Image (tube, rainbow, N blue to C red):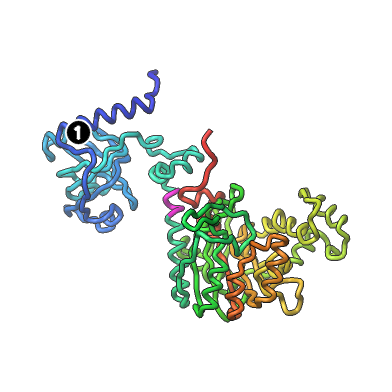
Amino acid sequence: MQPAASDNEYRQRRMENMAALEALGHAPFGRAFERTGDLADIRAAFEEGRAVRAAGRIVALRDMGRSVFAHLQDGSDRFQVYLRRGEIDEAAFAGVRHLDLGDHLGVEGTLFTTRTGEPTIKVARWTLLAKALRPPPEKFHGLQDVELRHRRRYLDLVANPESRRVFRARAALVRELRARLHARGFEEVETPMLQPLAGGAAARPFETFYHALQRPMFLRIAPELYLKRLLVGGMDRVFELNRNFRNEGLDRSHNPEFTMLEVYEAYGNATSMRALVQDLVLGAAEAVNGSRTAGTAERPVDLEPPWREVAYAELLHERLGNDWPDVDLPEARRRVEALGLAVEPQWDRVQLGHEVYEKIVEKSLRDPTFVTRFPAGLIPLARRCEDDPGVVDVFELVIDGREIAPGYTELNDPLEQRRRFEAQAGEDGEKIDEDFLLALEYGMPPAGGMGLGVDRLAMILAGVEAIRDVILFPQLRAEG
């Protein structure tokens, strides 16, 4: 058995083929090629004898001596082409012998059906559009190395139809979200990604330095405080499909750069936001999957309403006992540790309970669930519940064990907001957004607000388990 050729040897052979094609008059990197339509269009309008112009990447090539069969693939479909000596000139047929898998080809010809029943283009003329100097992964039988798929997404998309399906599903999701919000009268806006203060959420920011102003700046961790300024300004319904950045860990559900939909509606509240997010998720599921289902065949998720609504405290009582609010701190710590969780010595009861919620309770909620009435200390931007000032009027939508969307009845009291910011900032008063507090003093209407994790919703609708599989170019650790 002869040893497999190295990458350099494959590349050298392709360089030789490129030189041979150039000698035959085929420029290796062509110009634009006018097409009858993409390959899916040609298949949909197939008619025997119809003249067509098509283009795509060569993904299969069979030399039969006096004829050559190939398959072209574009972003829409894969289609067979047929080149036969005598039906194209000799120089053109000689050039076919120097084509390689991965080359981009434009063809002109007529449609016919082979004896095996396959729609095919009988080629009269062909044009080399781009020579591939490296071979495709595993001859298009699939790029199996998961790490390589993420690092070289361009190869993954070429080789794996499943990856193309996932990213088309994501695109359909984003289109549907925008369409439904526009239909409800929401206006799409853009707010700064480079901010003097990292506000709107509790997270470690990415920090940079703006030399023109000689000051540190931060990539935003959330757009919330800017969007609320727009409510003050009279824009009653706004949304932003935005990129957020958090200088934190990488895992199956987290990427430091991620996509959120944030929505704010003047004169709304958490209840109106629950209705809105349910409509958005159901519409997205129907657009992506054609039904109100998600997940995988092995782990399906039924999105059909009604969705469960349950208080945060009730879920903790199920795990930690009905007497949880009354036990002393050492006993609270013991119960949390008994569940296999590590705790920090400085944590209070709220932090202990929230660790149980995030690490155990949330992951157990498979069907769509609105978890409501969180402790006020956890969410400084939400309005307190009128019947219990110890909790705030919020929800978290959890689907398949993942938080998908938090929603609030927004706090619009500037005095209370200052008190909460000061409690959160402690001695670090420079972190308080004074301009936001000033805006609130001009009067922000009562409002509902909601953030929807686009990446996580895409994971659920497309049936994948890792956030890297729905982000085209995820952040990765350095090779080696």
The residue carrying pointer 1 sits among few (fewer than 14), some (14 to 19) or many (20 or more) residues within 10 Å by Cα, namely many
Based on the displayed image, in which of its 4 quarters is residue 226 positioned? bottom right
Q: Is residue 115 visible?
A: no
Task: Assign the magenta stretch its main secondary structure.
Answer: helix
Q: Residue at x 13, y 34 (%)?
A: 91
> Which secondary structure lies at badge 1?
helix
Residue situated in front as seen by the camera: 210 or 319 = 210
The boundaries of the magenta stretch are: 163-167
Say if 166 sits above or below 377 in the image: above
Say if 9 sits above or below 396 in the image: above
Q: How many marks?
A: 1
Q: Residue at x 47, y 48 (%)?
A: 473
Q: Position of residue 451 (x, y in %)?
A: 57, 66
Q: Residue at x 54, y 56 (%)?
A: 215
Residue indicated by mark 1: 21
Q: Position of residue 320 (x, y in %)?
A: 81, 59
Say if 101 sits above or below 403 in the image: above
Q: Is residue 246 visible?
A: yes
Q: Position of residue 208 (x, y in %)?
A: 53, 52
Residue situated in front as seen by the camera: 26 or 169 = 26
Say if 152 sits above or below 407 in the image: above
Based on the displayed image, in which of its 4 quarters is residue 95 positioned? top left
Residue type at mark 1 is: Leu
Q: Residue at x 45, y 66 (%)?
A: 176
Query: Does 421 lie within the magenta span?
Result: no
Q: Position of residue 78 (x, y in %)?
A: 32, 47
Assign the N terminus to one quadrant of the image.
Answer: top left
Q: Is residue 420 left or right of residue 265?
A: right
